[in-house]
């Protein structure tokens, strides 16, 4: 049986799914510059969560 998925990893996935969810779900425009800025910050959080989940404290 696989190990439990760390909560930090689930959180970053939920954050990505929730970002502008209504706009994406209803095919409304999303400001590109805001999306790029959000993604740049989210990517750092996602990298840290994945590294922690696999036991690697260095950057991916």
Image: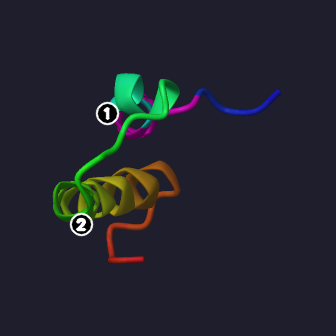
Q: Position of residue 34 (x, y in %)?
A: 17, 56
CB-based contact (under 8 Å), mark 2 and mark 1: no
Question: In the orientation shown, which residue stands out farthest toward the bottom?
Answer: 59
Q: Magenta stretch containing residue 55, yes or no?
A: no
Question: In the orientation shown, which residue stands out farthest toward the front?
Answer: 28
Q: Position of residue 12 (x, y in %)?
A: 36, 39
Question: In the orientation shown, which residue stands out farthest toward the right?
Answer: 1
Q: Quadrant of residue 18?
A: top left
Residue at (42, 77) in percent of width and height: 60
Q: Quadrant of residue 59?
A: bottom left
* Relative to 7, 40 lies left or right: left
Q: Position of residue 49 (x, y in %)?
A: 37, 50
Q: Magenta stretch containing residue 9, yes or no?
A: yes
| Mark number displayed over residue 52 | none
| Mark number displayed over residue 40 | 2
On the image, numbered disc 1 is attached to which residue?
20
* Relative to 34, 28 lies left or right: right
Front residue (pair 28, 14): 28
Residue at (34, 43) in percent of width and height: 29
Q: Which residues are magenta?
A: 5-16
Q: Earlier in the sequence, mark 2 or mark 1?
A: 1
Above or below — where is 8 with respect to 42?
above
Residue at (43, 67) in percent of width and height: 56
The crowd level at tag 2 (other Cα within 10 Å; few <14, some 14-19, many 20+) is few
The crowd level at tag 1 (other Cα within 10 Å; few <14, some 14-19, many 20+) is some
| Figure disc tally | 2
Q: Main secondary structure of the magenta part?
A: helix
């Amino acid at each position: 049986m696989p190990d439990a998925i760390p909560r930090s990893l689930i959180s970053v996935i939920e954050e990505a799914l929730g970002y502008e969810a209504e706009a994406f779900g209803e095919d409304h425009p999303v400001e590109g510059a805001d999306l790029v800025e959000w993604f740049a910050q989210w990517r750092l959080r996602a990298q840290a969560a994945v590294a922690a989940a696999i036991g690697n404290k260095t950057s991916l």
